[in-house]
Every structure is written in structure tokens, then in C-alpha cells.
Amino acid sequence: MRTVLELAVRSLLNRRATALLTVLSIACAVVLLLGVERLRHESRESFTSTLSGTDLIVGARSSPVHLLLYSVFHVGNATNNLSWESYRAIAQRPEVAWTIPLSLGDTHGGFRVLGTGPEFFEHFRFGTGRALELRSGQALSGPRDAVLGAEVAAKLRYRLGERIVVAHGAGDVSFSLHRQHPFVVAGILRHTGTPVDRTVLVRLDGMDAMHQPPAARSDVDPLDAALAARRGAAPPSTAPRAHHHETRHAAAPGPQASTDGHSAHGAITAFLVGLKSRPAVLSMQRQINEYRAEPLTAILPAATLPELWEIVGAVEKALFGVSVLVTAVGLTGMLVALLTSLNERRREMAVLRSVGARPTHVFALIVGEAAVLTLTGVAIGIALLYAGLAIGQPWLEARMGLFVPIGWPSMREAGLAALVAVAGIIIGLLPGYRMYRQSLADGMTIRV
Amino acid sequence: MTGSGREHHPPPVVDLHGLRFAWRATDRDLLRIDALRVPAGEHIFLRGASGSGKSTLLSLLAGVLVPDRGRILLLGHDLTTLSGTGRDRMRADHVGFIFQMFNLIPYLSVMENVVLPCGFSPRRRARALAHGGSVRAEATRLLGALDMADPALLSRPVTRLSVGQQQRVAAARALIGAPELVVADEPTSALDADRRDAFVDLLFRECRRAGSALVFVSHDAALAPMFDRTIELADINHADGADEAGR
Ligand SMILES: Nc1ncnc2c1ncn2[C@@H]1O[C@H](COP(=O)(O)OP(=O)(O)OP(=O)(O)O)[C@@H](O)[C@H]1O
Ligand SMILES: [Mg+2]
């Protein structure tokens, strides 16, 4: 059999132009197949780990996917807000370890502005439990502070200390600008690969202040004004603490409340909940869904994220289907090349028979050629894929926010590569069998 | 009944009885040969008209074809009772072939073509080793004996060799590992008279050295006197299905 394999290799080298084309088409198919598979896997990973450690997301009554879309991905808008009272009531439950309020609705330069509190920096986790990290500056400490996601800072080329004006409502062009209440860039986050990169973070009280009608602004909170003055940030006249919303919590905001952002606020869009013990999550979800004072919906991100991926990931499934087809085309090309070579190789087979080759050797020779072609193709494909990943990794991370690690192939990738190799060898059985039959019939005589 | 009186002699290389062969069951017999015997080391000239079935007979002797009736003993082994694999092994071990032309595998070098049978037959490999020290050394020796020692020739792709050179490479391949039977199917028909005689001389010398019997097919009667024996296929073939042209 060693002789036969040597013959297969020599024969292919003799037809190296065709062989090279076949190998390259298989290699390209493998690059596409494994590349799509890896991107699919990584985008699924990055998608489903947009949040980690959050047990529940709570918003006004809506469908789970909708709630997830607007609260985490900032896609679409909440149909209803939920009241500060409900938020505090749930946040103070004994099972709850932490909560993060989220208030959405404004934009800056096409990016969403998220009103939240210091809890966001403390408790928000993504990926494999990573916390947010500041690339420069500091976290939200005053009502005029804004912290920018990595992409926002990169795209809008903002530096620390810069003043930004927030527009009301979503969309790039907004006619209602909150000019009276500019924010100051206090910090810039490191890249996360999550929607946080495309978000401007501000404090809830800052957001509330911004939404005040000018008339209410004369009522200046002395404490906040003093704080702002001390930090030398904004003029005290534009740092109001009092609020005009009816939904405002009645409880008096103490000095502690005003610094940690837990003072009474207007309605919020949603909030994230971390529980003290995981097993409590289902009963907690049920309790929130049955909350009397207000219709609420609580979802488990760990369950709803994959559900949403099923919808969003359809494109990637189609892409995968296309790459499977390309692989099939590559292998068919090999089949055609092998089949067309058979007739001109009848004499070669007769000579081999005369020196003692059995018909099974002839069969093995052709199948061996198919095997050498596909295995070389798969090997070159894998090499090209890794070269491509090494070159494309920074780009993918910078442009798509997708970090594709260069590690060993996953089980699934190895399985796909093996599948291509096996398919190639199985495809080789057909011309192999044809040649086998031909060789039996021809024996050592060949008519051309 | 085969060599019953002379057990101390080696069995004949070929011993064939009551052979009948037709290409298709519905065809008339192409070959009907009562007996043919090729003793070890004998050089036989097999003559016959075109289409008379010479090549077919050689395929039968080599076990590539199976007769419809009769027995073909190759070195005492009945090919007709062996499996296909068994016949292929007998051929690999004991028979060397030279065809009329296109003998060589185009993508192998001269050397690789010559040593090819050793890849399929451990027995011939062992014999080549015993004789030349290494398979390549034996191949080099054979090529040298057949006037193909020039290194420039050896490094050339086989497709760029002249027909006469190709035939000598084929002869070296047929002879490597000293098979008991060398079968040559019109190996000289593409050569001019001088080249032909030189080729046959070299072939004889090497067959003698290896102790191989030679069955040499040709319709070129001029060669006949050089052989131990000449067989007219028409004389031994009693089939009426063979082409009548040569009679
Ligand atoms: N594979 C085959 N299938 C059917 N018939 C065949 C086959 N090979 C040969 N024949 C027929 O058998 C007959 C003998 O053919 P063969 O090749 O043995 O003749 P030959 O004596 O070697 O002739 P030549 O001197 O021209 O080589 C011819 O009539 C040929 O048509
Ligand atoms: Mg013939």
C-alpha cells in the first residue's frame, strides 16, 4: 500500500496544475466553512455573554425579547416605563443582592445615552464575568459626568473634559437638544464587545436635571450646586436637584442618597437584578411578573439571550449553509477532475496490472489521490484560516467589536474539517470504483 | 502427469492443458490449445497473424484472464483454481512483462519505473536485494547491462526517451527480481532492424543470467532462428473462431 500511496502522490505531482487548483478550491472552501463557523461561534458567544451575572432584567410589561432588546441592546424603545417606587420596592427585597437602574431615551451623536448609577460600574458584568474598566478618567461621580463607551469615544473623537450636549429621543438628528444641560466627559471605558461600547453613561440625577423644563431650573439644589462648585465642573445654576415629575419618590433624599444616585428619580426604563442565591431566580421572576402595583415583566437573560440569538443568528445560519454549499462545489470539482482523468489513465493502469498491481491497488490509487487532494486541501485551508485570523483579528476587534481568539480548533471545527476530509475520500470511491471495473475489464490490453 | 518421470527437475514454468477461451460466452472459441509447455529457462518465439489471439494467450498465461476450460499451471500452481488476488500475486512474483509500447508510467523516473515490481512483490524485492545488494543497485546493474547506464538518460523524464530506450527500461523492469517467466508482446515492432537485434541480444543475455524463460511474441519471422523453439500459434490452436487472415 505504501507503493500505491507513493504512486498517488507522484501521479498528482505530474498533474500538478489541476491538482493545485483542486487543492486550492478545497482549501478555500475549508477556510470559508471553518471561518464562518468560528465567527458564528464567537459572535454567539459574545452575544450571549453581553450580560453575565445578571439574574433578572425587569421592565414594564412587554414581551421578553422586546424587553431584552431595548434594555440591553438599546434597540427600539420601551412602550412603558416603570416607576421608581416599584424599582425601590423590588430592590429592597431580601433576596436581592444588587440592582442597576437603566434609563434610556436620549441620544448623543447617534449613540444612546444611558442614565444609571454607580452600581453599573460596581455590578455590571459581561463576557466571562468581566467588570467594566476605565481606559481613562473616572467613573460617574457627579450629575454632570458622562462616561463614554469605547466606540463612542473613538468615533466622536472625544477627550476627557469635553462638553457634550444630549438630544432628546433616538436618532441621529434630533430637534430637541438639551443645550441647557451639557455633560462633561469624565471617563472613557475600555472595549467590551457589548452595546456598552456604543453608549454614553450618565447619572440618573443628571438625566433628570436635563429633562427639567427651564422654568423648574431656578429651583437650584444647594447641595448639588455646592458639590459641583467644589469640583469646579459646571456653574451651579444648571445643577438642579428638585424634580417636577409626579412619579418622584416621596422619601426625602438624604446627603448619602444624593451622592450614590439613590435619591428619588423619575420613571426608569428597566433595571438589572443580581440575587443573593441563584435558585431563588424563578420564584423571584414569578413574584415580579405578578407584581400588583404595576404590570411588570422579569426575564432571565440566560434564557432569553439564546432565544433572541435564534432570531438574530438566522443570517449566520444562512451564511453557514452557503459555506457548506461552497465546500460541496469544491469537492465536486475534485470529482470531475478525477473522473475526466480516468480515460487517459487506462494504459497506466494496464501497466500497473502487468507489474503485479491488483484491481484493488488501482482502486486504492484513485481513492488515495482523492484522499491526498482533500487532506492537503483541508490542511492548507486550516493554515490559511489561522493566517487570516492572525491578520484579521485586530480589525475584527476594532471594527466589529468581535474578539476572535486564536486557539486550537474547537471540537466542532475539528469535526467539520474531518467531515470534509471524509467526504472527499468517499467522493473518491466513485472514480476509484469506475477505474477498478475498467481495470478488471481491460486487464493488460488497452485500446485507445 | 506433468513431468512425472523427472521429479528432480524444476517444474515447467508454464504447463497448459485443454485450454479453451472465448471473449464472450456467445462468441466462438478464440483459443483451443491442447497442450503447451514452457520449460524453465527456455526461449520461445511465438508467431501468429494479427488478431490470432497471441496477446490473449499471454494474458491467460499471466493470470489476467481465466480460461473457460482447461488448466494453466504456472510453476506448478494452477491459475484456474486461484482467486483473482492469488493470480495477481503469482504474476507479481513470477512474471515480467514487456509490451509493444507505452510500457512506462509517465510520472515516474526511469529508476522508479524499473523498481516498480519490487513494490508489489516482496519476493522479487528480496531477489533483487540478494542479487544487487540493494534494489536500486540491481536496477542500475540491469540498466547498465541493457546499455542504459548514461546518467543523463536516467535523469530524463521517461516520456522524453526514444522508443528503443523505453523498451530497454521496460526490459530492465521485466527482469528485476529475476522472475521465472518473461513475457514480451511484440517489444521490437517499433524498432528498426539494427536496434531490434541489439535489443533481443541484450534481452537474451539478461534472461539467461536471471534464468528466466522467455515467451517472445512477434510476427517478424527474421527473429525466429535466435530462439530455442518457435511456435506457430496456428499450429497449436485448433479453434475455428480465430481470425483466418494469417493462415
Ligand atoms: N478485451 C477484448 N474484448 C473482446 N474481444 C477482444 C478483446 N481483446 C481482444 N479481443 C479479440 O480477440 C482477438 C485476438 O486478439 P489479440 O489481441 O489476442 O490478437 P493478437 O494476436 O495479439 O493480434 P496482434 O498481433 O494484432 O496484436 C481479436 O479478434 C480481438 O478482436
Ligand atoms: Mg497483440
Image: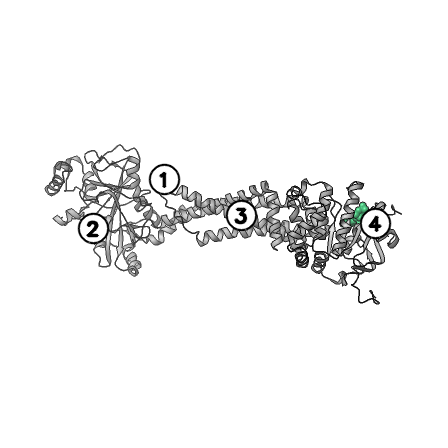
Residue B82 in sight in this render: yes
Check chain identity for marks 1 and 2: say if they share one.
Answer: yes
Image coordinates for residue A43, horizontal then vertical, percent = 39, 47
* Position above or below: A316 against B34: above
* Position above or below: B181 against B107: below
Q: Quadrant where the C terminus of chain A lies? A: top right
Q: Which residue is mark 4?
A: B226
Check chain identity for marks 4 and 2: say if they share one.
Answer: no
Front-most of A321 and B201? B201
Tell me which label, 1 or 3, sits earlier in the chain: 3
The kind of secondary structure element at disc 3 is helix
Question: Mark 2 belongs to which subunit?
Answer: A
Nearest-to-viewer mark from 4 and 2: 4
Left or right: residue A289 versus residue B219 is left
> Label 2 neighbourhood size at 10 Å, few (<14), some (14-19), many (20+)?
many
Q: Which residue is mark 3?
A: A376
Tell me which label, 1 or 2, sits earlier in the chain: 2
Q: Are marks 4 and 1 in contact (CB under 8 Å)?
A: no
Question: Mark 1 belongs to which subunit?
Answer: A
Give the CA distance from mark 3 to mark 4. Answer: 54 Å
Amino acid tagged 4: Met
Nearest-to-viewer mark from 3 and 2: 3
Question: Mark 4 belongs to which subunit?
Answer: B
Front-most of A311 and B47? B47
Check chain identity for marks 1 and 3: say if they share one.
Answer: yes
Residue A85 - label: 2
Residue A170 in sight in this render: no
Residue A399 - label: 1
